[in-house]
Amino acid sequence: MAYDIEQVRSQFPSLSSGTAFFDGAAGTQTPEPVARAIYDTLVSPISNRGKGSASARHADDVTLAAREAMGDFLNADPAGVVFGRSMTAMTFDLTRTLSARWKPGDQIVVTSLEHDANLRPWLLAAQQAGAVVRWLDFDPKTGELPVEAITAALNSRTKWVAITAASNVIGTKPDVAAISAAAHKVGARVHVDAVHLAAHELVDMQGLGADIISCSPYKFLGPHIGVQAASTDLWHELQPAKLAPSPNSVPERFEMGTLPYELLAGVRAAVDFLAGLEPNAQGERRERLETSMAALHEHEMQIAQALVEAVESVPGVTNYSRASERTPSVFFTVEELSASEISSWLAQANINAPASHFYALEACRRLGLGEAGAVRVSAAPYSTLEEVARFREALHAAVQQLRD
Ligand SMILES: Cc1ncc(COP(=O)(O)O)c(C=O)c1O
């Protein structure tokens, strides 16, 4: 496999800042072709979506092309791809729509591994509907979410299971396919938060057994927008709150107001960029994505290994990323030192390694980290081993300085 890191890096203008960006899990840097697609869309004739003029057709084409791209990216039906402001906003909208049909005593299942965006909207919706919430807890010692726990949490009243495909703090990848299969057996449906996973591995909505899947392109080199995908059959069952004159077609009825066409062009460009990461990749876009994301995975695992070694070489460190299946993110604290001080010190050395709970509040509480969270470093397509070496040196220097 050919992963040409220098060729990849040459396409990211922001890397000329010299910053080592290990903060990709909070949002990645943008390659030039994505920014160019956004710019080109804005400066070429474009009107509101329609068929009546060339510029209206342009908006229509951009929208359909973005749905196709996300269909390939998620292994989803393009006709079931919905765009919205962010994964958070979309999940609030979704849970309001779903819960309008819940009855007191119905159940939903959530996990303590979630980013709050796949938790709070479900909890609030359940509260409003009088539905019962069942929790699946991960083991803070191992970082694993035991699949067996789902069996006890499910019953015939379970309507939805909300689960992450990967924790955005400790990186754990639960066995979502097994959990979905168990949920489907009792007639429940599954919403998968693929925001963190999608940056690192090719998502397979069908393989995961997701009824609805969510992701955020700004985590995988694209613009700041949210995406949700489901089968058109499922979308047809649901009736969201909408304006009277806005289309009632699927998926449009879930997209409130005018879509940001320029960002949709950026989404398509991001998917095409990822599909081209391995220059020898052949075939249709999904096949090229498979080859390219496998090459990316190999690259990022090498970076992750080096990050783990760098972190674990520090005396008094605790590395919370321990699950056997996980993304290339390392979440750590150093005894007696504040995570945010370490992060600030690294930022001064031009190394982005933020410290927070990263909105995975329940997970951080369960890890005993409270609201302060920990430092998180993640591999990205543009990360290099040389940057990891810089990180290692700066981390040791930070710890020494802060201890003195
Ligand atoms: C795992 C996970 N889920 C959901 C979100 C929320 O996504 P958005 O910023 O698009 O609302 C994030 C953002 O960090 C995340 O990491």
Image (cartoon, rainbow, N blue to C red):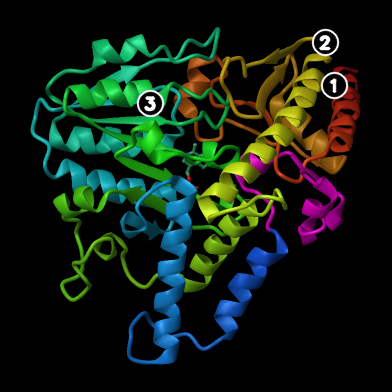
Beta carbon at label 1 within 8 Å of ligand 1: no
Q: Residues within 10 Å of mark 2 (few under 14, many from 20)?
A: few
**Is-magenta flag for residue 19?**
yes
Tell me: 347 left or right of 72: right
Give x and y (percent) for residue 267: 53, 61
In the rendered image of this protein, does residue 306 appear above or below residue 245?
Answer: above
Q: Where is residue 336 in the image (x, y as percent from the top left)?
A: 74, 14
**Residue at coordinates 78% horizontally, 20% vertically from top-left?**
311
Q: Are marks 3 and 2 in contact (CB under 8 Å)?
A: no
Instruction: Judge left or right: residue 307 versus residue 246.
Output: right
Q: Quadrant of residue 214?
A: top left
> What segment is highlighted magenta in the picture?
1-30
Give the residue furthest to the front: 283
Closer to us: 344 or 250:
250
* Residue under the image location 76 percent in, 28 percent down: 302
Answer whether labels 2 and 1 touch (C-beta < 8 Å).
Answer: yes
- What's the amino acid at mark 3? Ala
**Rendered image: mark on residue 2:** none
Q: Can residue 70 be seen in this view?
A: yes
Number of numbered discs visible in the structure rendering: 3
Q: Tell me the residue at 59%/71% (across/down).
A: 38
Closer-to-camera residue (348/6): 6
Q: Identify the residue under disc 3.
A: 177
Which mark lies nearer to you, 1 or 3? 3
Residue 399 image label:
1
Mark 2 vs 1, N-terminal side: 2
Q: Name the residue under label 2.
A: 315
| Three-letter code for the amino acid on which mark 1 is drawn | Val
Residue 99, image x and y in percent? Answer: 18, 41
Q: Residues within 10 Å of mark 1 (few under 14, many from 20)?
A: many
